[in-house]
Image: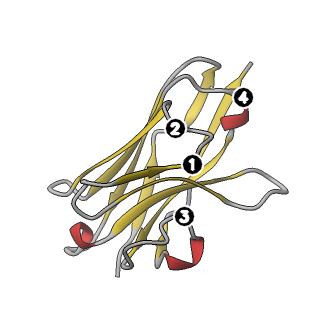
């Protein structure tokens, strides 16, 4: 069982930065692929970024590539999402998720555990 708690969301102006954190409980955190997804009202949840259990491999949606960076600290059971050059279209609830499956990282269904989410609002 893994419990995930996100933090770091807030209101920021376009062009600004935020760093989201996702703290995980459980001793097996280091064995999970971790992902970030986001959702806005009336839209489906979309993949943002993912990182392999070791941190050696990272994956990004085209819409955030070059602006967002995912990282993890297995000693702290935490995954991060550094978001730079934020745009109003990045406004969403951001959720982290843990998957025991390698591969298919952009697919919601492979993730076993989800956090409650943190709101990110980017003003123009």
Q: Secondary structure at mark 1?
A: loop
The answer to whether the residue labelled 1 contacts the one labelled 2, judged by CB atoms less than 8 Å apart, is yes
The answer to whether the residue labelled 2 contacts the one labelled 4, judged by CB atoms less than 8 Å apart, is no
Give the number of the mark in front: 3 or 4.
Answer: 3
As measured in the structure, the alpha-carbon distance from the residue carrying label 3 to the one carrying label 4 is 23 Å
- Residue under circle 4? 88
Relative depth, front residue between 114 and 65 = 65
Which residue is painted at 39% across and 62% down in the image?
34
Q: Residue 97, how many percent across, how many down?
A: 47, 65
> Disc 3 or 1, which lies upstream in sequence?
1
* Residue 101 shown left or right of residue 105 in the figure: left
> Disc 1 or 4, which lies upstream in sequence?
1
As measured in the structure, the alpha-carbon distance from the residue carrying label 1 to the one carrying label 4 is 17 Å
As measured in the structure, the alpha-carbon distance from the residue carrying label 3 to the one carrying label 1 is 8 Å
- Residue under circle 2? 65
The answer to whether the residue labelled 3 contacts the one labelled 1, judged by CB atoms less than 8 Å apart, is yes
């Amino acid at each position: 069982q893994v419990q995930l708690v996100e933090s770091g969301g807030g209101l920021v102006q376009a062009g600004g930065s935020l760093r989201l954190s996702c703290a995980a409980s459980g001793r097996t955190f280091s064995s999970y692929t971790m992902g970030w997804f986001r959702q806005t009202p009336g839209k489906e949840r979309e993949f943002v970024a993912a990182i392999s259990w070791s941190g050696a491999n990272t994956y990004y949606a085209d819409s955030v590539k070059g602006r967002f960076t995912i990282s993890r600290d297995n000693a702290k059971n935490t995954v991060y999402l550094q978001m730079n050059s934020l745009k109003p279209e990045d406004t969403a609830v951001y959720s982290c998720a843990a998957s025991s499956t390698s591969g298919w990282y952009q697919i919601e269904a492979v993730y076993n555990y989800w956090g409650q989410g943190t709101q990110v609002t980017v003003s123009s």
